[in-house]
Image (cartoon, rainbow, N blue to C red):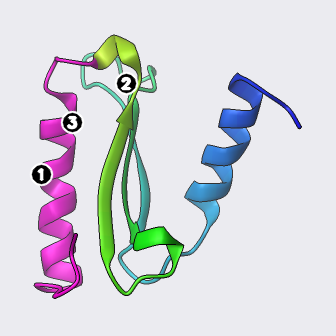
Amino acid sequence: MARGPSRHEAFLKDRIETSFGEGLGYWSIFPKAQPDQFAGWILLIPYDDVGPEIEIGWRLCRSTWGKGFAAEAIRPIVEHAFHTLGPHPYCR
């Protein structure tokens, strides 16, 4: 099994291309000041990939930690979740 960046890239590509249902999935984060620099991702998926609970999460490159990227990126995803899924009783 591949290790390191190539393994991570394959994992992320698979997750981005997977259909988790309408309004759900992974979104990439790119800084406004450096739009060609991948900063991480936000996810809105069924908890443990099966649900019915919905998980909201993120993973950021270490170089972006403490700079407000997570807070700025999560706001539109939470808004999207409530508009697309409604106030879901199983949000964790």
Q: Residues within 10 Å of mark 1 (few under 14, many from 20)?
A: few
Q: Closest to the observer: 50 or 27?
A: 50
How many angstroms separate mark 1 from mark 2 (CA)? 19 Å
Indicate left or right for 41 with 71 as reference. Answer: right
> Which residues make up the magenta segment?
65-92
How many angstroms separate mark 1 from mark 3 (CA)? 9 Å
Q: Amino acid at mark 3?
A: Ala
Residue 14 locus on image (x, y percent): 67, 55
Tag 2 or tag 3, which sits nearer the N-term? 2
Q: Which residue is mark 2?
A: 35
Q: Closest to the observer: 29 or 90?
A: 90
How many angstroms separate mark 3 from mark 2 (CA)? 16 Å
Question: For the image shown, how many numbered marks are present on the structure?
Answer: 3
Of badges 3 and 2, nearer the viewer stands 3
Q: Residues within 10 Å of mark 2 (few under 14, many from 20)?
A: few
SS label for mark 2: loop
Q: Which residue is mark 3?
A: 70
